[in-house]
Image (cartoon, rainbow, N blue to C red):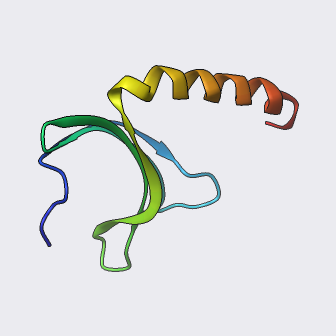
Amino acid sequence: MANFWDTEQEHARVPKKGTKASYYSFKVVSKDGRDYVDVREHYTKADGTEQHTSKGISIKFQDFAEVMTAFRDMHEVLRDKL
């Protein structure tokens, strides 16, 4: 299977709670000269290979700071529930 992104570099993995074989991957990726932060859910198949799900988001670099501010605001709203 061909890779969608022209370039990609993983910077972090966060285990998904409640599962042994799933995680969230944080990558810097590019496509056609545009750069993004890609956050995607991955899992390990029964044969041991890793596969990403369709669950994820790619955020343009220029929008990333504003999106992170929204995440910080949401964290404050949910603080008592986390």
Farthest bottom residue? 46
Farthest right residue? 80
Name the one closer to the observer, 32 or 49.
32
Location of residue 19 in the rendering, given as x and y in whole percent from the top left corner: 58, 61
Q: Quadrant of residue 53?
A: bottom left
Name the one closer to the observer, 20 or 3.
3
Image quadrant holding the N terminus, namely bottom left
Q: Residue at x 77, y 23 (%)?
A: 76
Against 13, is 56 above or below? below
Q: Residue at x 72, y 28 (%)?
A: 75
Q: Residue at x 79, y 36 (%)?
A: 82
Q: Is residue 49 left or right of residue 78?
A: left
How many circles with numbers are drawn on the protein? 0
Q: Is residue 47 left or right of residue 71?
A: left
Name the one closer to the observer, 37 or 17.
37
Name the one closer to the observer, 40 or 20.
40
Location of residue 80 in the rendering, given as x and y in whole percent from the top left corner: 88, 30
Q: Is residue 16 left or right of residue 36?
A: right
Against 11, is 68 above or below? above
Q: Quadrant of residue 13?
A: top left
Q: Residue at x 43, y 65 (%)?
A: 54
Location of residue 49 in the rendering, given as x and y in whole percent from the top left corner: 28, 70
Q: Is residue 61 left or right of residue 22?
A: left
Q: Quadrant of residue 72?
A: top right
